[in-house]
Amino acid sequence: MNEEQRIVATLRAEAAQENCDGEPYDTMVEAADLIDSLIGVLYQNGFERCNSPACNCGSWHHVGGFKLRFDEIEEATEDYWRNGETLLDRIKRIAAERASMEVALNEACTSEAYYGIDPPERWLKALGLTP
């Protein structure tokens, strides 16, 4: 039982005793409900209580962010997917293709033939396409 659960249980137990009616006890029940509600908000937004023996801070850590970022990358690059390719391999391939395109463009822009070619034709030539 963590600290919040212990506090909630204590508040509910104290408020449930015989002859415990009225304002202070109603407030205790409301406080227990609020704590439960706030803990629910934390869980719903990807937070979990620290359970790492190395950290053991007793606080809350956001754990959902990494998976969400990977899902976003996966979705953004799904048009480039090849059968059996992992996400990491896909990113490496895309980066390598981009680097080779940059080299080709740089070579095309610094070559002697660069001056005198119209810009649309220059780009097509740099990409290995004929105008």
Image (tube, helix red, strand yellow):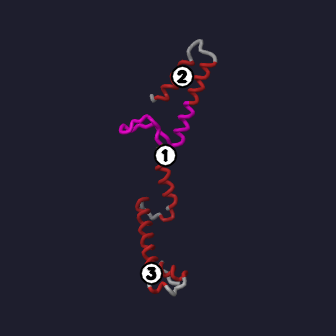
In what element is the residue under mark 2? helix
Part of the protein shown in magenta:
35-61
Answer few, some or many: residues within 10 Å of disc 1's Cα (few below 14, many 20 plus, some between 14 and 19). Answer: some
| Discs 1/3, front | 3
Pointer 3 or 2: first along the chain: 2
In what element is the residue under mark 3? helix
Task: State the residue at coordinates (49%, 57%).
Answer: 73
State the residue position of label 1: 64
Residue 120 at x, y percent in the picture: 55, 81
Residue 93 at x, y percent in the picture: 42, 66
Q: Which mark is residue 110?
A: 3
- For the N terminus, give its image quadrant: top left
Question: Which of 119 and 13 lies nearest the eye of the viewer?
Answer: 119
State yes or no: residue 10 in magenta: no
- Report the amino acid beneath label 2: Leu
Pointer 1 or 2: first along the chain: 2
Above or below for 82 versus 63? below
Q: Which mark is residue 3?
A: none
Task: State the residue at coordinates (60%, 19%).
Answer: 24
State the residue position of label 2: 11
State yes or no: residue 59 in magenta: yes
